[in-house]
Amino acid sequence: MARRARMDAYPARLRRSARRVKVGLRKSGVDYFRGDGSDWIALVGLLLTVPAITLLTVATPVWAAPAALVLPIVAGGLLLRPASLLALYAAAAGALIVESAVLGPYPQGAARVTPGTVLVVAACGLFGLLIAQFRARVGVPWRRGGTMLFDLRERIRVQSALPRLPKGWHHEMALRPAGGQSFSGDFVVAARTHGGRTLEVVLTDVSGKGMDAGSRALLLSGAFGGLLGSLPPHGFLPAANGYLLRQDWDEGFATSIHLVLDLESGDYELLSAGHLPALQLHAGSGRWEEKSGEGPLLGVYDGADFHPVKGSLRPGDVLMLFTDGLVEAADRDIAEGIDRLTGEADRFVASGFQGAAWHLIEACAKDVNDDRALLLLTREA
């Protein structure tokens, strides 16, 4: 019985050992692809491909050319740290020496190790080393780079989400970055304050466009989101201006428009920091009116004053906030662009502006190489 117990215990120990190895490999792989672990797994895998490619090249040099060694080198530039990459390069250099010795001098036939092959492999190795050093300096492995950018984009999108409004109000927003990119210098922050009675919305256009302005827009959207609702409405733009001045950016200005709307009465105030005027459609007359406060750009000088303009949204009225990319272009001035925008917007009066924001960008500024943002706020009739 003791012998049988020992025999039964051996497979159990073997299974436990196999399970520990499996868990260890899985943990190492997860840590590696998160950017937290060692790159030894990738290094071992790539080192094993070098002799495999060498054997294949020696066996069939016509189908597996000596230049095939660039494959693990390119992969190493994306996967490995600079120190590990040097070990891979040493193995590739040794493989080239072996292939040259086995296949013979290149003047004696095709599919040999030529000086051009050596130059191609060396050039790929140099580029791979530069990429690895850049990743090491930044501190973000390529495996996390795409995830990180996606997360940043989603944070901007979430911060730009408008809060749910009470019955009788409709809002929608459309934002299109320049050049079809994922990051924009235009952003919106919004919050309901005073127990949900007041809607505060800030539309900001950061200097620059696309990816160049995306990082500044992310920083400012987080800061503006923290300021909004924490300060009285008239204190927001001065605080935002002071924050922007403290950043001391080379290209550190922005335009912004701040809407403070009473959701019960429909009365509102607009405060502007060098931004384009808002447009209000009066349902009774069917005419558009420009509404804009007075104030300088954010980030230009300290102690700036921002003077509001007041208005009221009656049932059926519409308020549009937008950035200059929607109405400004090289072949037309802003006034002409605003006329075109209002003309296109009149087509959506009958439908109550449902789904109108995106269509207005498509109609007015589809091919404009600038960030475009449009916010529609409608008080239903």
Image: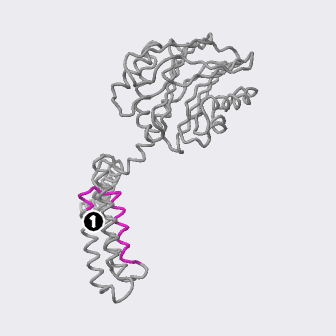
Residue 357 % position (x, y) = 63, 32
Residue 120 % position (x, y) = 35, 70
Circle 1 crowding by C-alpha within 10 Å: few under 14, some 14–19, many from 20: many
Q: Which residue is mark 1?
A: 88
Query: As displayed, is residue 338 above or below residue 144?
Result: above
Choose between 351 and 6: the one closer to the eye.
Answer: 351
Residue 134 % position (x, y) = 31, 51
Q: Is residue 75 magenta?
A: yes
Q: How is the image coloured?
A: one colour
* Disc 1 secondary structure class: helix
The residues colored magenta run: 64-85
Quarter occupied by residue 166: top right
Furthest-top residue in this view: 265
Q: Main secondary structure of the magenta part?
A: helix
Q: Is residue 89 left or right of residue 284?
A: left
Q: Residue at x 25, y 74 (%)?
A: 94
* Figure quadrant of the N terminus: bottom left
* Picture mark count: 1
Furthest-bottom residue in this view: 108
* Figure quadrant of the C terminus: top right
Query: As displayed, is residue 180 above or below residue 354?
Result: below
Quarter occupied by residue 13: bottom left
Choose between 27 and 250: the one closer to the eye.
Answer: 250
Q: Is residue 172 left or right of residue 255?
A: right
Query: As displayed, is residue 153 above or below residue 47?
Result: above
**What is the three-letter code of the residue carrying label 1?**
Leu
Q: Residue at x 51, y 44 (%)?
A: 181
Query: As displayed, is residue 131 above or below residue 264?
Result: below
Q: Is residue 17 magenta?
A: no
Q: Is residue 31 left or right of residue 190?
A: left
Choose between 249 and 44: the one closer to the eye.
Answer: 249
